[in-house]
Each structure stands twice: as structure tokens, then as C-alpha cells.
Image (spheres, rainbow, N blue to C red):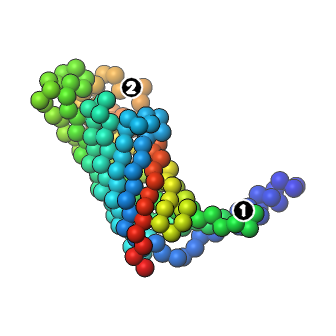
Amino acid sequence: MNIKLSLLVALLSIQTITAQDNYIGFSAGSDIKNAGKDLIFQVNMVSSDVEINASYESHAALDFTKYSFGLGYHFPLYAYPFGNEVRTVFVPSIEPSLINRTGDWGGGLDQNETSSHLSIGLNLALQWSINDYLSVEYCFNALPRTDLKTKYPDSIKNYTNIGGVPIVGSNFLKIVYKIQMN
């Protein structure tokens, strides 16, 4: 009974707030699994909790770059553990992307050839505010990898896929700097 009461109190102490975010943000981060090898840089504009962003991802060891434009919505959440306010924002977004592969990825391209592939991914992010200007963000990105289907059509069976296109998940940890526009 005590555990159920504790869970109820915890759920009641988390509430959504109608306050709206309005800022321009700059972030940099890395895929947790490929720390330091798979980097992401993003610029975003948030107005009335609607986010528009542009990002660049690079994984040089895989001859992989990605350019994306995203559209998302901020769902502010507040928790009050031990009487202290912890501000978290949940940001789901959709991002049309251009995946570029260069070099000799897959063994079939020479150094001067490039290969470009369109895709559309989904992001689920949690952003924890340190203060009004700085946040830490965890972002899960699910991206249909049209480049892998094109180059390795027979070896993508081990991936979760939609219509034969493998969905690859990445877990990014980012630092976000915000310029408030209130």
C-alpha cells in the first residue's frame, strides 16, 4: 500500500504547465554508443512551444553525413522531488533528412563518388533545464536508412524494417545553449 501511495504522490507532483518556450537554441552532442565519432550539431527556433530546427550529423569513420530539418512540439513537464523544481521538456519531432555517403563505404564506391538518399525520421527528446540558458538533452532518433537498403539489400534482415527499409536508432546526448526571446 505504501508503494502505491508513493507512486500516486509522484504522479500528482508531475504536472504539465502551459508556459510557452520562446528561444533560439544551439546544441552539440554525440551518439552515446559512438561517443566522439558520431557528432550532431543543431540550431533550433522555438516559439509558443513549436520547434523548427536544422541539424548536421557526421560519422567520419562510416563516411556518413546527414542534413535534416525538423518540426516538433514542446511539452513542458515539471517535477518537484524533495520540494525542488526540476524542469523537463518532452519534444517529439519529425525530420526529413538527406543522408550522404562518400568514400568507399560498402566497398563499391571509389573515393570521388557520393551517394545521397532521402529519408524521414522521428525524434523523441527529453530536455532537462540547468538554468534559463543551458540544458542537457537526451534524444532518441529512429531513422529509416534508405542508404543501407540501397547498398546492402541482402544483409538488412537483422534490422527492424518497414517495407524492407531498415530502421536504425541512435541515442544522442547534447548540450543546448538558449537565447531567450521573451
Q: Can residue 1 be seen in this view?
A: yes
Distance (Cα) linking label 1 and label 2? 45 Å
Depth order, front residue of 152/134: 134
Depth order, front residue of 81/147: 81
Looking at the image, the residue that sits furthest to the bottom is 182
Crowd tier of the residue under label 1, counting other residues whose Cα lies within 10 Å: few below 14, some 14–19, many 20 or above: few
Depth order, front residue of 34/118: 34
Question: Image height check: is 18 above or below 103?
Answer: below
The kind of secondary structure element at disc 2 is loop
The kind of secondary structure element at disc 1 is helix
Give left or right: position of 36 versus 13. Answer: left
Instruction: Please name the amino acid that badge 1 sits on.
Output: Pro
Depth order, front residue of 27/6: 27
Q: Which of marks 1 and 2 is nearer the N terminus?
A: 1
Residue in view at x 24 percent, y 46 percent: 98
| Label annotation for residue 81 | 1
Instruction: Please name the amino acid that badge 2 sits on.
Output: Lys
Residue in view at x 43 percent, y 79 percent: 182
Residue 33 location in percent, x, y?
Answer: 47, 35
Question: Image height check: is 54 above or below 149?
Answer: below
Residue 4 falls in which quadrant of the image?
Answer: bottom right
User: Which residue position holds label 2?
Assistant: 157
Residue 96 location in percent, x, y?
Answer: 29, 52
Figure quadrant of the N terminus: bottom right
Q: Can residue 90 be seen in this view?
A: no
Residue 84 falls in which quadrant of the image?
Answer: bottom right
Give left or right: position of 145 versus 7. Answer: left
Residue in view at x 52 percent, y 76 percent: 19
Residue in view at x 32 percent, y 36 percent: 59
Q: Nearer the viewer, mark 1 or mark 2?
A: 1
